[in-house]
Amino acid sequence: DLFLAETGSRLVMGFNVGILPKIKELAKEHQVEVRLYSVIYKFVDDLKKIAESLTPIEEKEQVVGRAKVIALFPGGRKGIILGCQVLDGSLALGQKFRLISVPGSVYMGTIDSLHIEKDAVREATAGQQVGVKIHNFNRARVGDLVESFEVARPKKPFRWQPRGGVFRY
């Protein structure tokens, strides 16, 4: 079990079992952690904690603003300016956004430019009309929805790493 764990998880768990002589030295030498339990609920709890710490973190999106496209303006060679009416929340420089059309999300990017009339602004709130420039995309339509969002990554308390050796719990 020790040599098999060395090529994979680097963890051996046992319940109500003993160990052979020299296993402690081999476990340290090969950086494999051997955990021995005499109480089943401790075994199950530790197994759950270790498994949770090794699963990937799921990112969650939180919508912070919505706007409706009410006009389209030329925005240079390969771009377009969306004239938008902010419906709720806010649109701000640096936020990620997606353009939602009839088939679904058709464009994702970052807000690089916001203008209210001819003035550059950092943020537009509900009720305001704002221009949002999109680069390398020109298939937007009047009536599309602009949705700005933030990506939140929940923090994990720890990530399990093998310590090498034999431990009794």
Image (tube, grey):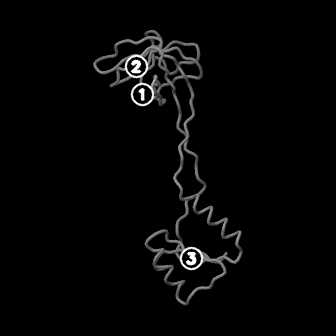
Nearest to viewer (mark 3 / mark 2): 2
Badges 2 and 1: C-beta atoms under 8 Å apart? yes
Residue at 59% x, 20% y is 88
Between residues 51 and 160, which one lies in front from this camera angle?
51
User: Does residue 161 appear to the left or right of 110 in the view shown?
Assistant: right
Specify the label residue 140 is tagged with.
Answer: 2
Tell me the distance, in whole angstroms, between the alpha carbons under discs 3 and 2.
Answer: 59 Å
Tell me the distance, in whole angstroms, between the alpha carbons under discs 1 and 3.
Answer: 51 Å
x%, y% of residue 82? 43, 16
x%, y% of residue 96? 47, 31
Of label 3 and label 2, which has the lower sequence position? 3
- The residue at the far front in this view is 103
Q: Secondary structure at mark 1?
A: strand
The amino acid type found where label 3 is placed reads Val
x%, y% of residue 17? 63, 83
Badges 3 and 2: C-beta atoms under 8 Å apart? no
| Residue 22 position (above or below residue 100) | below
The amino acid type found where label 1 is placed reads Val
Of label 2 and label 1, which has the lower sequence position? 1
| Residue 76 position (above or below residue 53) | above
Nearest to viewer (mark 1 / mark 3): 1
The amino acid type found where label 2 is placed reads Ala
Task: Tell me which corner region of the image, top left, top right, bottom left or bottom right, holds residue 127.
Answer: top right
User: Does residue 13 appear to the left or right of 71 in the view shown?
Assistant: right
Which residue is under mark 3? Answer: 34
Which residue is under mark 1? Answer: 106
